[in-house]
Amino acid sequence: MGGILVVDDDPANRRLIQMALELEGYAVTTAATGHEALAQAAVQQPVAILLDVELPDLDGWEVLDTLGALGTVAAVPSVLLLSASDGARIRRAAQQHGAAVLTKPFDLDVLLEKVERLATPSSA
């Protein structure tokens, strides 16, 4: 399985997601800030990115915009945004960025199911 980049400023969330994904066999890299995420994405070129929308420096949208400008988003087939907000606005914005959304707090089984779908290349 390919590598997953988990970006969340909450250390407990980051560690929980990392442990769950590693138990499923994924190689996981983590970042606590938007700048760390950009650096990790450039080096790792992950299969999928789990990206918190609210980060202390750059928010998730700025990270996506920067990755897009650098051409990195094209190399990352899937982005799952993690957000405490479940409004239509965030879903529309995510759709414009080609990302899926998972609302916090989330069920770990649902997260794993979404990651499996995002990280598995479609057989089209």
Image (cartoon, rainbow, N blue to C red):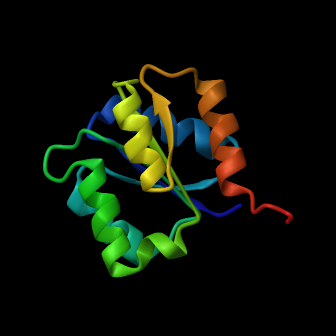
Quick one: 95 or 108, which is closer to the camera? 95
Residue 40 vertical position relative to residue 56 in the rendered view, above or below: below
Residue pictured at 22% horizontal, 43% vertical: 55
The spot of residue 13 in percent (x, y) is 39, 31
* Picture mark count: 0
Q: Name which residue lies at 21% across and 62% down.
A: 35
Left or right of residue 68, residue 112 in this image: right
Name of the residue lying farthest toward the left: 57
- Which quadrant, please, contains the C terminus? bottom right
Check the image and report above or below for 68 versus 22. Answer: below
> Is 33 left, or right, of 28 in this rendering?
left
Asked if residue 33 is positioned above or below residue 89 in the image, the reply reads: below
Please indicate whether residue 66 sits to the left or right of residue 77 in the image: left
Query: Which residue is the extreme one toward the right?
Result: 123
For the point 71% across and 46% down, which residue is it? 116
Where is residue 47? Give x, y as percent.
59, 64
Name which residue lies at 64% across and 27% down: 110
Question: Is residue 100 or residue 114 the one in the foreground?
Answer: 100
- Foreground of the two, 116 or 85: 85
Placement of the N terminus among the 4 image quadrants: bottom right
The image position of residue 62, as x and y in percent, is 24, 57
Residue 96 appears at what percent x and percent y? 43, 53
